Image (tube, coloured by chain):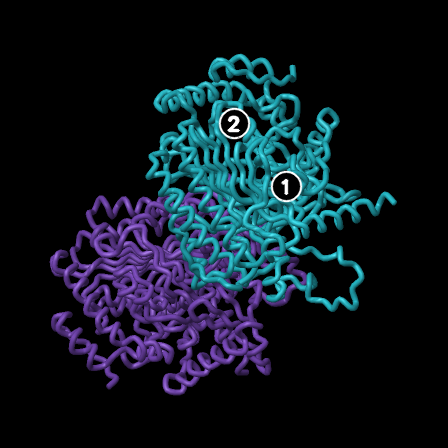
Chain colours: A cyan, B purple
Amino acid sequence: MIRKLFLTIGLMQVSAVYAQDAPIVHDAEYYILEAQLSDQWVTDDAAVDAKLAEFRRVNDGKPPNIINILIDDLGFGDMGIPELNAVRGYETPNINRFSDEGMRMVRMYTEPSCTPTRVAMMTGRLPVRMGMGDTTVDIAGFGLPRQEVTLAEVLKKAGYATSHVGKWHMGDIAESWAMNQGFDYAQHAVHQQGQLTVYHDDAIREQVSVGIQDFDPAYTLDDFFRPDASAMATVIEGETDGKIREVRMETGERWNSAKYDEMNQAFQDKTLEELRRLSAAGEPFFLQYWPMLPLDNTRTGRDGPESPNGGLYVDKMQQLDGWLGEIFAAMEELGISGNTIVVLMGDNGHFTKYSPQSGFTPMIFRGGKGDTTEGGIRVDAFIRWPEMIGADTIVNNIIHVSDLYTTLARFAGATDFVPRDRLIDGVDQSASLLFEDESKGRRDSVIVYSIDTPKAIIKDKLKLNLPAAGQNAIGADFFDIFRDTHEKYPVSTEVGAWGGQEFVRILGRHLARKEKYPDGAPATGVPYEGIENLRPETQAAVEAFMVKRASVQK
Amino acid sequence: MIRKLFLTIGLMQVSAVYAQDAPIVHDAEYYILEAQLSDQWVTDDAAVDAKLAEFRRVNDGKPPNIINILIDDLGFGDMGIPELNAVRGYETPNINRFSDEGMRMVRMYTEPSCTPTRVAMMTGRLPVRMGMGDTTVDIAGFGLPRQEVTLAEVLKKAGYATSHVGKWHMGDIAESWAMNQGFDYAQHAVHQQGQLTVYHDDAIREQVSVGIQDFDPAYTLDDFFRPDASAMATVIEGETDGKIREVRMETGERWNSAKYDEMNQAFQDKTLEELRRLSAAGEPFFLQYWPMLPLDNTRTGRDGPESPNGGLYVDKMQQLDGWLGEIFAAMEELGISGNTIVVLMGDNGHFTKYSPQSGFTPMIFRGGKGDTTEGGIRVDAFIRWPEMIGADTIVNNIIHVSDLYTTLARFAGATDFVPRDRLIDGVDQSASLLFEDESKGRRDSVIVYSIDTPKAIIKDKLKLNLPAAGQNAIGADFFDIFRDTHEKYPVSTEVGAWGGQEFVRILGRHLARKEKYPDGAPATGVPYEGIENLRPETQAAVEAFMVKRASVQK
């Protein structure tokens, strides 16, 4: 039976009853594994429950705090491995230390770009299920629907205080924003770095983005064509059901590199402030810090630390490393390192567009942000929970970013609040993480989408690039990811005839399941509606957008 | 004054006098660094001397034992980094533990293939200086000249017992062989794996090497054209000035996969035997173990450990990992771990020809064996010396494999026996290793040859692919190795106009120095002469070779 229940009785009691009553609805492949492994899973679940119960017992009956740090555009191997730091000629000492204290999830798969990864993490669902697979940069008038139940909402129902600082990037309409999606408090940018590092005046002067404003108006008719970072809404702040205001931006003010630095510093300061506030309040808390770094694009006015060897992104990553060090130190000082889970990871591979000047080029895997090769979707990913997960450990089972939704909910004792009326792609990886055991993972495959199109299927160590329409799967490129990290040498001759077909069947089951749980659409609306201090130039930009939107209905 | 002295007085006394009297002759770039850093070097040298003297004081007046393990064809990141083990889906636990106990030399540069790397390591000189830059596989009638002073000869003069087991691959004539180049005892293959894994019957049946014997003799006139592994000399054994015999191969016997396995096991057993013998004898010793693994090419008769995820080479590397574990355990048992230097490294990048079935594909760097891209010449390289070099450390200064000659001689107190009558490319890296300090390295550049042609120059983090004849250096490909490990994005537009010219000047100085110290030629001779039990089929193969050699003089 699929139903929604918001129970308020003790978590442990609910868990046993409710989980039996209405399990979470998963995609097809989950049930194939379950059919083979359910006995083991029952045993593992009992062991996980016992371990979590023991944690709560010694933690004054409370579940752990959760801090979720999501770094913007970062390839595999850029953090936490001193040997690879040396290969790159820079160091990330704080993150390396953090890595030594926690667990590396070596096969963490994200989506290929910012928005879909964040949607998968927040909803536990593939972004295609609500049409959020694309990454928009400027005013677009759509976003994450209010019907989605975010991890913040799940945790809030389980008694967590929730707060979000930094990037968000899941829509420019009010219902999509963090303070309307389960966060008690949020301060976040409305858009992303395309606006904040490319569309502004310094970037245009540096020719980072040719064509935006370096044109002779004599030859230009359409004022609505080019984006203007300063006219778009920048950073908003608000509380659930409260007023939403744009911060640190006055009417007529121009956005530039200095403003970007100021914003990033403000996010860092606010995160530390929230950490102290939430820690003092005593409730279990869920704090998200999604820095808008290391991605950056201009050098104007830079006076921060610079890597002697890295490019611009590496400079920024080293700055970020220092900032994360501050956060870890503050946790120590507050005495919450032990009872707080910290997840730290990248949201997708390197942004290779500015290679090599950025300092970010693919190293271990092929490709970067936007690609469905491993370089686009494999990232550095760590989880630290000192009292529960072994220090300096590694798990190598496949974990998709959506699994964090289900797994963190489990750790928080909030599994009951995961909705049962929709398909949840995230599976519960608690047992593999808590017992450092790949064989206890609950997923051995990932379907890799690019926006709304499935492009590849990974199952254990094999990866099929899905054949185009009309192409026989036997001839599709098929890779052994362990042997060939750069996806350069297809092994189709050996396994294509079996694997191609078998993988296409995986896709078939995935698509067949959509008949029961069809994909939805994103929410649409008037951009920025609900920002009470909207600047006149921003209002004008919205009106220009509305003219464009209406043009197709004339 | 350049002269040769073989002094027999106490090492410490000689050192002070002799070093001042006639320094080692280096290539031009060394003197440019020396002009800038000599004050620091004097200070560092005194500190190194003090540290080495202290070691000898507590080690009963003796310098350290040295074990030099050189693995065949291995890319960067295949050993010692658990995260990358996970990426590859296999484990090298013994080597990883070894890595934790020692120092990783992250920027160890080798030559692009087996023979030149081994020549550089043994002579401290670029292989081009005696025409040994190529890697021959079958009967060739040339090799390392007796005039070269190998590291074994240097150490022997300083009182070391010397022994070599495994690969050698520096010629098929007697004067080139290990027992005639400074090793008291040697057991080594004459050729390399081309013969031992490709030219034999199992490999031909498996079609590993199409064309060698799978032909219709009706269409074949030249019986001398194709090599036959069984007719070529295989493994020889002997002592200095003693008889040299081929071992484990009878007249009429065929070489095959089983023989290859038997040989490798015998090398391992002999290494352990030599370790015990040398350790018991009480003199400081220099033991080389150059396994002919992991490179392998056939699956016939395989019953060894197989990696569930790796290909054939990875299977073999895991076998090798176990074998190295045995050696490390034996060292513990013998109580010599503390006073023995162990160098462990690969000889060049992956042999990517059989990718990905081999399990070896480029990962962090571009290219493999034979290439002058980083993937061909960057290898995993470790040095362990528990009482002198910090555990789990990294140095990132450029080290060329020839530097091991000079550096190990220094550690052994044998610097006086490094010849002064020729140019030595290896520099003394003692200070950077002993003090874990890149700034104490004595090299910031490498000239990368392919056989006899300089192909690239690396200086600090920059690499120029040398322009072809008539090509302007401004347009040559120029890479930032830190930012772009795959050498995919030339930065010529930024630095080519400066760097191209400056790098060409480095080459110019290197070439100008050859006027004073000209390149020589390899020694030539009758193959296998001096093997006292040469088989009739081997004698016939030599005669065929001599016919070929003589053909150009008819």
Q: Nearer the viewer, mark 2 or mark 1?
A: 1
* Residue B42 found in image quarter: bottom left
Please, what secondary structure does the residue beneath circle 2 have? helix
Q: Is residue B486 above or below residue B360?
A: below
Q: Is residue B167 left or right of residue A473?
A: left
The amino acid beneath tag 2 is Leu
Q: Residue at x 35, y 64 (%)?
A: B532
Chain letter belonging to callout 2? A
The amino acid beneath tag 1 is Ile
Report whether residue B289 is seen: no
Q: Could you give the CA–CA distance between mark 2 and mark 1, rounded to whole angstroms?
A: 26 Å
Q: Which residue is mark 2?
A: A155
Q: Is residue B276 left or right of residue B205?
A: left
Q: Residue at x 58, y 56 (%)?
A: B209
Chain letter belonging to callout 1? A
Task: Indicate which disc, 2 or 1, sits on the residue closer to the N terminus.
Answer: 2
Q: Position of residue B455 (x, y in %)?
A: 51, 73
Q: Which residue is mark 1?
A: A531
Q: Are marks 2 and 1 on the same chain?
A: yes
Q: Quadrant of the N terminus of chain B?
A: bottom left
Please, what secondary structure does the residue beneath circle 1 have? loop
Looking at this view, is A287 or B169 the one in front?
A287
Looking at this view, is B489 or A417 the one in front?
A417
Marks 2 & 1, CB-CB < 8 Å contact: no
Q: Residue at x 42, y 35 (%)?
A: A277
Q: Position of residue A175 (x, y in %)?
A: 65, 34
Mark 1, Cα crowd under 10 Å, few <14 / some 14-19 / many 20+, is some
Q: Position of residue B258 (x, y in %)?
A: 45, 47
Please identify the residue farthest to the right as the structure is shown.
A554
Q: Quadrant of the C terminus of chain B?
A: bottom right
Q: Give the number of callouts.
A: 2
Q: Is residue B269 above or below residue A34?
A: below
